[in-house]
Amino acid sequence: MKTILSYISIVILLCAVASCKKETDAMILPNIAFKTGAGYTSGDANVAQNTSVLVGITASKSEPNDVLKTFDVSVSYDGGAATSVHNESLTGSDGDNFSTDYPITTRSQAGTEKYTFTIINRDGLINFVSLTLTVN
């Protein structure tokens, strides 16, 4: 009798394990975009030296469990290597939806300034948008 109960227990356990479905992660990049509209610069532009421009960013998670973890801004001058100028850990409701305005003042010399805005989610997936300011 104990043997039959043992076999029944094993069969029930195997059925329970076999019926469990593991949730799969689609590994979808987080969403990020420029804010558009009056007052925002949302693409490449020609600007004067020492000019202030406002860049707005919106980002959101693309999967229910893959919250946003990090927001980073980097800049590259005249085609040089990019350097991080702002890095922010995201917590709470910012992990679901993040929005920020980032003011930029151009240098007092002619050249190019490429700004890259990066969002990283819980899985380490990275998405970004960038724009280049040509300073006259």
Image: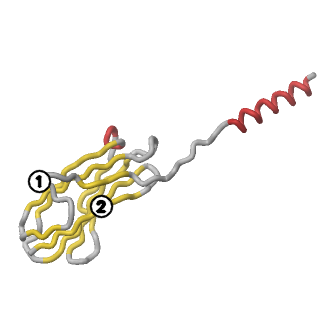
Q: How far apart, in angstroms, are the residues tagged by discs 1 and 2?
A: 18 Å
Residue type of the residue flagged with mark 2:
Val
Which residue appears at 90% of the width and 24% of the height? 2
Q: Which residue in the rendered view is the most extreme toward the front?
A: 37
The percent position of residue 130, horizontal first and vertical second, equals 27, 64
Residue at 15%, 67% (x, y): give it: 45
Q: Is residue 92 left or right of residue 8?
A: left
Hey, what amino acid is under mark 1? Gly
Which percent across, then down, holds residue 49?
6, 70
Q: Residues within 10 Å of mark 2 (few under 14, many from 20)?
A: some
The residue that mark 1 highlights is 39
Whichever of callouts 1 and 2 sits on the residue coming sooner in the sequence is 1
Look at the image and tell me in which quarter the C terminus lies: bottom left
Per the rendering, the mark at residue 20 is: none
Coordinates of residue 73 in the picture (x, y in percent): 26, 60
Which residue is denoted by mark 2 in the rendering? 129
Tell me the element at label 1: loop
Relative to 16, 63 lies left or right: left
Using the image, determine if residue 70 lies above or below residue 64.
below
Q: Residue at x 37, y 49 (%)?
A: 69
Q: Quadrant of residue 106?
A: bottom left
Crowdedness of circle 1 by 10 Å Cα count: few (<14), some, many (20+)? few
Q: Secondary structure at mark 2?
A: strand
Position of residue 20 in the picture relative to residue 70 (left or right):
right
When the figure is inspected, residue 136 is found, relative to residue 128, above or below; the finding is below
Image side of residue 25 versus residue 59, left or right: right
